Amino acid sequence: MHFFDFLKEAKNIPSPQILKNLGTRKLETVVGGTFDILHIGHETLLITAFEIAKKVHLCIMSDAGIKSLGYKKYPTKIRPFHERKKNIIDFLAKLNLMNQVIISKIEDPYSYAIQGQQAKMLDSIVISSELSVIERTKRINTLRQENALQPLDIFRIPMIFDTNGTPFSSSKYRNSEKKEEVKQELPTYYLTDTIREIVSKPVGEFVKSVEELPKPKKGVIAIGDVVTKNLIHFGYPISIAVLDRKSKRAAVEYVIPYLAQENEIYDLIPYLPIINPSGIISKDSWYKIYIALTQPNPMIIRIFGEEDLMGFPATLIAPEGTLIIYGQPPPKSGLVYFFVNDDIKERVISLLERMKKIYGGY
């Protein structure tokens, strides 16, 4: 049933949790790091910053700064600044995000956020959950207050784990461990006219409102921005949300889910980016949906393109009993849901076999 040895059905899925919605985006956030050997953990940190704020100040540590700080493993193997910056620019350009970013070289973790005109514009910071990073960030807020600046809202996201269950980490890759990549043998599926009408028909039970949904047996995957917003509004638990920031091709009001807040620190749900143009299921989707489903914490899958076909990989990869919920557009507006089982997986496979399959590409 499965296509590749490493792309297995997820044995577990993050436990569904009731989320809160931050709602309004921040104006200008800052995110910083070394960003050596750009990996999924970096991508998630960066995209989370772009999701919570309209403008991102992206700070990359200089070569001299890395040397003076001295806390990175295998520092002699860290790529030079110009190469690390180019990799970030290439990544953001693919997602059309360069008009929302200010990229700066920094010499230390503090100065950019506490000195100069840009420090006055910042209202938030996005960080990982590493203890050393949290302590440095609290120090930034202390220094800001000493400089008569408002403390930053701190948005903290958890570590992201690879298919072996260990955090994505540049230091691992610098130490000659092979970087886990999207495998070239993963296929991209293209929707064909022969099954377009079949795919457009809803599969599952129809309900008019969130209150009519059944109690989840295991994990919950919400597909769509409006669906996710409604589930959060009514306090329905979510494991994975799939968003593309559009509803019927039009931009929608932002949903910014988070778990909890303590003083200035928000435990944010991380955004895992996927490139998936309209009418396809990209190889990027197969791999990263598997990554999302195997995390210990709720995740948001942020689709750059279109999320309409994401139910296919989600259904095949999710364990049996997972509840998948998506929207039913007008005139019969409401929600459609189903519990993943072998029959539905077989139906998905039969439809995939009727699509055009290409290796390579997205």
Image: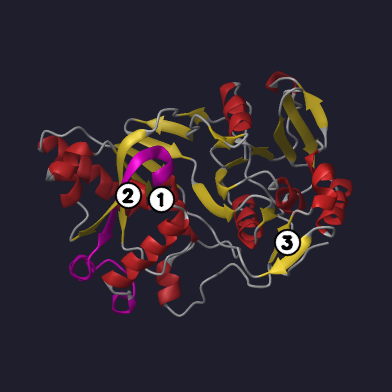
Residue under label 2: 101
Q: Given the current orientation, which residue lies at the most extreme front position?
A: 193
Badge 1: residue crowd in 10 Å (few <14, some 14–19, many ≥20): some
| Spatial separation of the CA atoms under disc 1 and disc 2 | 7 Å
Nearer to us of marks 1 and 3 is 1
| 352 is higher (above) or lower (below) than 218 | below
Please, what is the three-letter code of the amino acid marked with disc 1?
Answer: Leu
Q: Residue at x 60, y 24 (%)?
A: 235
Contact between labelled residues 2 and 1, with CB atoms less than 8 Å apart: yes
Contact between labelled residues 3 and 1, with CB atoms less than 8 Å apart: no
Q: Where does residue 157 sit, x and y in percent of width and height?
A: 44, 46
Please, what is the three-letter code of the amino acid marked with disc 2?
Answer: Val
Residue 71 is one of the magenta-drawn residues: yes
Q: Where does residue 290 sit, x and y in percent of width and height?
A: 65, 56
Badge 3: residue crowd in 10 Å (few <14, some 14–19, many ≥20): some
Residue under label 1: 97
| Kind of element beneath mark 2 | strand
Q: Where does residue 229 sit, x and y in percent of width and height?
A: 57, 28
| Spatial separation of the CA atoms under disc 1 and disc 3 | 32 Å
Residue 154 is one of the magenta-drawn residues: no
Is any part of residue 83 visible from this angle? yes
Nearer to us of marks 3 and 2 is 2
